[in-house]
Structures are given as structure tokens and as C-alpha cells.
Image: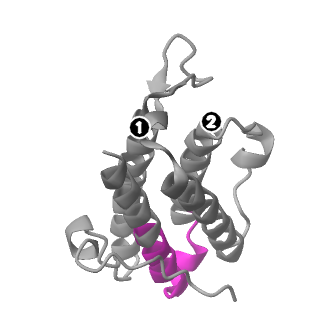
């Protein structure tokens, strides 16, 4: 199971980087507040569950602040990917059953495996929304299908910050 979750996380970051690159290459999308809010939400949710799994504090006031520019958002995505990939690629399989308590759902607990899967699926859904918005603005979304990624499993190709 750990191998599959590691692949899902690696694919997630590859797809996130591709979406950020596509948005950055399209003037209207780069300036679009709706896309920036969706991308921020993807990152915020990812960071929430990651920090919970790492037993680190999620500082709501800092995390809720939407980046003012796409470059800032790209930097935060990239930094978070490094932390998460470093963590999950070293995670022992036995840690997948460790229970996490989400502050937003105080009467429930979730395994680390559940949290990782939640983040991957949640990101996927919001990337689809970004793709639809990008297309509506006249842009072209990147290929983000897992099955296309799994052939060569490339690392994320992060866009350069301007």
C-alpha cells in the first residue's frame, strides 16, 4: 500500500506543477482570482493534512492568507512538495495506521493512509476545476492523468518564478 500512496503523492505534485505552469503561461489565467483561490485551497488542504501527519502546527492565520501573486503560490507549492515527498518516501509502512485527529472533525480519527489518500483525491478534484476554468479563459490544461504519468513517473516540472 505504501508504494501506491507514494506514487499517488508523486503524481499529485507532478500534476500540480503542470497546472501551475499552464496557468502561468496564460495571461488571463495568471490574473484570475478564481483560479488563484482554487490553487490556494489545494495547497491549504494539502498543508493541513501534511502538518497534522508531521505533528506540526497549522497556523490558520498564515495558511488562510491567499498568495498575492502566482509566483508566491508556486514557491509555497514547491516548498510543500519537498517536505511531503521527503516525508512519505521515508515513511515506514507501519506509520500508515497511525491515527490523526483533525481539529475540524474532533469526534473522529483518521489513519495516515486515509489522510494521504484524502489529499490526493481532494487535489485531483480541484485541479479539474482549475482545468475547466483555464479552458473557459481560453487556455489549455496540461495532461494530468495518472495513467499517462505512471509510464515514466517524471518528477514535477516546476515553473520558473518570474
Q: Are marks 1 and 2 in contact (CB under 8 Å)?
A: no
Q: Quadrant of the C terminus?
A: bottom right
User: Relative to 69, does residue 7 appear above or below in the rendering?
Assistant: above
In terms of secondary structure, what is the magenta stretch mainly?
A: helix
Q: Position of residue 66 (x, y in %)?
A: 69, 56
Residue 66 circle label: none
Of 107 and 27, the residue lying toward us:
107
Check disc 1 and report its element: helix, strand or loop. Answer: helix
Q: Quadrant of the N terminus?
A: top left
Observer able to see residue 122: yes
Q: Is residue 36 above or below residue 26?
A: above
| Residue 41, percent from left and from top | 55, 51
Displayed quadrant of residue 126: bottom left
Cα gap from disc 1 to disc 2, whole angstroms: 12 Å
Q: Secondary structure at mark 2?
A: helix
- Give the residue displayed 38% in from the left and 43% down from the top: 117
Q: Residues within 10 Å of mark 2 (few under 14, many from 20)?
A: some
Local crowd size for mark 1, using a 10 Å CA cut-off: few (<14), some (14–19), many (≥20):
some
- Residue 154 higher or lower than 86, as above or below: below
What range of the chain is rendered magenta? 15-33
Chosen colour scheme: one colour
Give coordinates of residue 93: x percent, y percent. Answer: 42, 41
- Residue 45 vs residue 68, the one in the foreground: 45
**Left or right placement of residue 85 versus residue 111 in this view:** right
Give the residue displayed 43% in from the left and 77% down from the top. Answer: 18
At x 53% / y 54%, what residue is drawn? 90
Q: Earlier in the sequence, mark 1 or mark 2?
A: 2
> Is residue 7 on the magenta stretch?
no
The disc label shown at residue 113, or none: 1
Q: Looking at the rendering, which quadrant does residue 133 occupy? A: bottom left
Instruction: Determine which residue is flagged by label 2.
Output: 52
**Left/right of residue 23 with respect to residue 133 in the rendered view:** right
Amino acid at each position: 500500500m505504501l508504494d501506491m500512496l507514494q506514487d499517488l503523492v508523486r503524481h499529485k505534485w507532478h500534476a500540480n506543477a503542470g497546472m501551475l505552469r499552464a496557468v502561468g503561461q496564460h495571461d488571463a489565467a495568471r490574473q484570475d482570482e478564481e483560479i488563484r483561490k482554487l490553487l490556494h485551497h489545494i495547497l491549504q488542504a494539502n498543508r493541513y493534512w501534511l502538518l497534522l501527519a508531521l505533528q506540526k502546527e497549522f497556523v490558520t492565520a498564515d495558511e488562510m492568507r491567499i498568495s498575492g501573486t502566482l509566483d508566491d503560490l508556486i514557491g509555497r507549492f514547491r516548498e510543500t512538495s519537498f517536505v511531503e515527498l521527503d516525508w512519505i518516501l521515508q515513511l515506514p509502512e507501519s506509520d500508515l495506521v497511525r491515527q490523526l485527529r483533525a481539529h475540524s472533525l474532533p469526534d473522529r480519527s483518521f489513519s495516515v493512509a486515509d489522510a494521504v489518500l484524502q489529499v490526493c483525491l481532494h487535489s485531483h478534484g480541484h485541479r479539474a476545476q482549475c482545468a475547466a476554468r483555464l479552458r473557459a479563459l481560453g487556455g489549455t490544461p496540461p495532461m494530468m492523468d495518472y495513467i499517462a504519468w505512471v509510464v515514466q513517473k517524471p518528477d514535477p516540472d516546476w515553473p520558473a518564478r518570474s
